[in-house]
Image (cartoon, coloured by chain):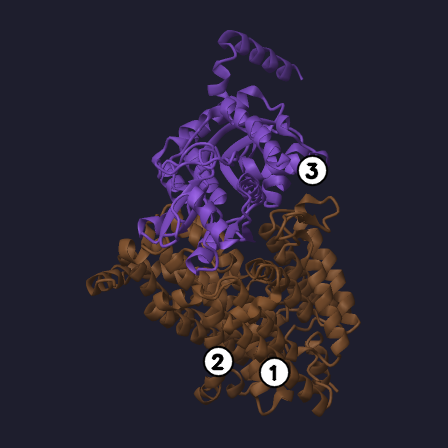
Chain colours: A purple, B brown
Amino acid sequence: MKLASKLRALGAAALIAFGVPALAQDWAPDGPITIEIGFGAGGSTDTMGRVLAEVMKEQTGWNVIVENRPGGGGVAMFTSLSQRPVDNQTIGMGVGIPVLVQLVQRGDELPFDIASFDYLGTIAKAELAVVASADAPFDTLQEMIAYAKEQGNMPLATMAPPQVLMMNATTKASGVDFNLVTADGGAEVIRLILGGQVLAGFASGEHFPYMESGDMKVIASANQSRLSYAPETPTFIESGVDAYVDAVFFLAMKTGSDPAATAAIAAAIDEAVQSPEIAEIVRNAVQGDPINMGPEGAKLMMTDGLENAKRLFAN
Amino acid sequence: MVDFSIILAGFVDVFTPINLAFVVFGVVLGQFVGAVPGIGPVMAMAIAIPFTFGLDPLPAIAFLVGVNKGGLVGGAVPAVLMNTPGTPDAAATAMDGYPLAQQGKPLKATKMALFSSITGDTFSDIVLITVSAPLAILALKMGPVEVVALMVFAFSIISGLMGESLTKGVIAAALGLLFSFVGTDPEHFTPRLIFGYWDLFDGLALPSVAIGMLAISEILRRMSETRRGEGKGLLVADTGKPEDRRVSFAEYWACRFTLLRGATIGTILGALPGIGSTAAAFMSYAMTKAASKEPETFGKGNLHGIAATESANSAVVGANLIPLLTLGIPGSVTAALIISAFMIHGMQPGPLLFENQGRLVYGLFGAMIMANFINLWVGQAGLRLWVKVVSAPEAVIFASALLLCFVGVSMATNGLFGVTVMLIFAVFGLLMHSFGYSLVIFIIAFFLGPQFEKSLAQAIALLNGNLLNIYTSPVAVALLALSVMSVFWFLSKRSNTAADTTNLGVPDGETLDQKHP
């Protein structure tokens, strides 16, 4: 007892002596750090998360382990994260937009909201585009709309609800109907386009090898800004359809975590994101460069994203 | 076209002692983990991928190829020896493998599974290496409309396997479909039947349901039949005859058409993403049974039954690499894992793969050929070991199998929620079994239901909401016509012959009775 209280006093003295800022460097996890991935094994989130854990482990010497907790595009993972007590070493990794969509659609059923988490940073942004086969009779979104109008209808593949909403906004802006086929992921969109079953579809990087081989072209950027790999292609917004989707891969912990822990982990993530290993895997997974918006930027991304998701659903 | 020197260089790269060692290690690990009840081939891959992070690309890929192929062979072992398949496609192997093992011929049954698996695998590898590019283009032309028709055709053939009671078969299939509806609907992404459990958002996990229904319920049932103090082994004593311990060349050769049919079905279904090895295994089994002169021997230890299923489900795995390598499209869970492993090692599957990384791809092909041979040798030795292992007292075997199923499912589904689901389905499976409903039909419906629903939704969208527009696809119309014909054929056969005696849901009850009347 006596020893314990002495130690506590010593700890307090050290705290006063070295001040709070030093804590971020001094903080070390008590046991392994767990990155819980909101998607199953084998997807791009999983692949990036595993490499991130590997790099963090090397750089910090912490034991970083990865667990998959798929369900509802990350909702199952964030639900369970928000329900457990704060332990300062469980990190959730997910994608913004699927979580935001669920928050808009059935926020009252979910036990968490944006404020339930402390944001640590981001690792990458998936650049979402509408792509078509290279021999499609249109090159831009406006030409595609004109073509669909001429044909009366046009089959187009989507892979998630926000994209359906974007196409609904397009229909609203132009009066042209699209025949939306729901595909199970970007790879299937590519297959439907290559097979000629649909003329265009949404893809986030899966089309890249086909652009390189000259079999596909980009019609429009579905992001807020233009695509990094096709800067001359306009966005939906620039083409007169006021809608966009941004999908950012981010990391967060339960709110109320020790600030020293979040600061240390956020710093470790930032260091890892700058490594060549992460650059390579991000390029392979989303065809872009790693982006870390930092804790503040990640939080802003979520709040802005929620507003945008609400606007999409209002259409 | 890839330069011949690149092909040669790729093969030269891979045939080194280091790569050979990694393939051997991979095959051993794959066969071992694949054969452990409750863990199975997919988990074998998932476990192996992190091991490769520190390796060079070629040894890493060679190792994973070894694990993948070893897992295929291993997956049949618990199905044959203990009647506890961990995956739906292994359930097809259990139908004839387990009765044969119970006749005192466990080595014969597992060896037939090994040879058939490697035959099917080698067949699809040869197709992959030689004609993958044109085949992939052909497969692309099979859009959702054609896939729906193909699945209807597969169902019409599999329906020939319905047990003695058509009503009970239909009920089992309907229940399977009902449970497959749990989770997000594929069209509008609205949660269905989840009752507030977000863990169910992506549906009931296949490992939980398959292992609970097929493995745990079987173990529980057999435990209830075990009498106290009986320290006997799980297997019936070996017959002692050498011809029952091996598969002679004559026996293998007699199955050549069965193997070829299985391998062809597996390769075709494998090249089309999303249908998968379960449909292939059961389709091949049903076609073999229908073509056989003595269909009544199926389900009682017919070597053709093992040959049909194992050649088909192994061929699917090799053929899954066709869309994976040429188009970057994964056709199954294992294929998705392989893609992520390739990406980690800087290999980008897709149209430019052969051009940009031809040397690595041909290294991969070389590793596949190596792995097939090594699989055969390691399998010969490993199977003896497994047969020895299951000759331990039942109490030991059942307890450890249960434990491994718990561990396996909690790993595969990331937590205890999946284990709970598994236990619920184990009890459900036990009930279904005691009332004479086929578990296998339930599992087929559960597994293929969501894929069928998704393709149907896509097809309806493509046909402008009117299924009658299907005449625009001649392939689909032909397949549907074939389905109608096969249903009529099976029905007429059913009314001609007396009720089918091979009751799928009760695979061992009858065979045991024949042995111990």
- Left/right placement of residue B15 relative to residue A235 reads left
For disc 3, the marked residue is: A106
Q: CA distance from mark 1 to mark 3?
A: 47 Å
Tell me the amino acid under the disc marked 1.
Met
Q: CA distance from mark 2 to mark 1?
A: 20 Å
Secondary structure at badge 1 equals helix
- Left/right placement of residue B435 relative to residue B132 reads right
- Left/right placement of residue B147 relative to residue A219 reads right
For disc 2, the marked residue is: B261
Which quadrant of the figure has residue B77?
A: bottom right
Secondary structure at badge 2 equals helix
For disc 1, the marked residue is: B485
Task: Check the image and report above or below for B393 versus A37.
Answer: below
| Residue B312 shows up from this direction | yes
Residue toward you, B413 or B229? B413
Task: Check the image and report above or below for A143 versus B317.
Answer: above
The reply to whether discs 2 and 1 touch (Cβ–Cβ < 8 Å) is: no
Residue toward you, B486 or A3? B486
- Counting other residues with Cα less than 10 Å from the Cα at mark 2, is it few (<14), some (14-19), or many (20 or more)? many
- Looking at this view, name the residue that lies furthest to the front: A150
Tell me the amino acid under the disc marked 2.
Arg
Q: CA distance from mark 2 to mark 3?
A: 50 Å
Instruction: Kindly indicate whether the residues beneath marks 2 and 3 are on one polypeptide chain.
Output: no
- Counting other residues with Cα less than 10 Å from the Cα at mark 1, is it few (<14), some (14-19), or many (20 or more)? some
Residue toward you, B154 or B38? B154
| Residue B226 shows up from this direction | no
